Amino acid sequence: KNQISKIKKNEGQSLIELLIGVTVGGILIGSAAILLTLALKVSSQNKFLQTASFLSQDLMEKVTVFAEAKWYCPLGNCGIYNLNRAKNYYLTGNPFQLQEAVTPQEEITKDGVVYRRYFSVRKVCRNVTNTPVGNIYGITSGIFDTCQLIGTAEDPSTMQVTVTTLWIDQGGGSVKIVKFL
């Protein structure tokens, strides 16, 4: 009789151990699946950010070349210095042609995702203060066509350019690069 009760105890313990093992295994597999899903999502977001960064840098380089070729134009919006501060622009063609960015902006499709990019410009104001060690020049960007702060003067040889690339697909996002030319 003792042997039979020992066998029954062992069978019961094996069933409990099996249930505990299945439960722990299920928790581990579920946790691993969640972590894998998050890692894949972060990886795809990084891919979108890298592509948008590349496209932003590409447009910034084009704007830099365009600005060196056409800084000022007495006839209107043909030089970078003459551009309207309230509008966005992009460049097309070779040599570059300036286009006003209205919705949609310049659209580029990479790996099935549509990216939109454009740039805007601001005049630059120099804040000049006298100190015992000489003149210190600080740069601020002028939101309006004139420098609003007392003690600032417009610097016609410098412009602040902001390039923006955005995407709406796959959760969306944007990348901005700011550079003084």
Image (cartoon, rainbow, N blue to C red):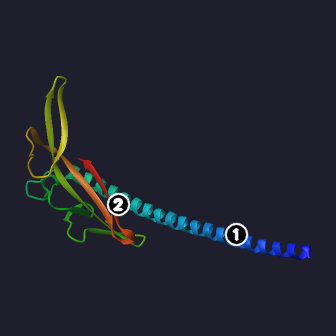
Q: Secondary structure at mark 2?
A: helix
Report the residue at 19% width, 41% height from top: 139
Report the residue at 92% width, 76% height from top: 1
Residue that carries the numbered disc 1 in the rendered image: 21
Report the residue at 16% width, 62% height from top: 87
Is the Cβ of the residue at disc 1 closer than 8 Å to that at disc 2? no
Q: Of residues 172 and 73, which is closer to you in this image?
A: 172
The x, y position of residue 137, in whole percent, is 18, 35
Q: Which mark is residue 55?
A: 2
Crowding around mark 2 (Cα neighbors within 10 Å: few <14, some 14 to 19, many 20+) is many
**Disc 2 marks which amino acid?**
Leu
Q: Secondary structure at mark 1?
A: helix
Picture quarter containing residue 92? bottom left
In the shown orientation, is residue 21 left or right of residue 35?
A: right
Query: How many marks can you see?
Result: 2
Picture quarter containing residue 140? top left
User: Relative to 9, is 98 above or below?
Assistant: above
In the shown orientation, is residue 29 left or right of residue 172?
A: right
User: Relative to 43, is 152 above or below?
Assistant: above
The x, y position of residue 167, in whole percent, is 34, 67
User: Relative to 23, is 159 above or below?
Assistant: above
Picture quarter containing residue 97? bottom left
Looking at the image, the residue that sits furthest to the front is: 1
Q: Which mark is residue 52?
A: none
**Disc 1 marks which amino acid?**
Gly
In the shown orientation, is residue 8 left or right of residue 121?
A: right
Q: Of residues 2 and 149, which is closer to you in this image?
A: 2
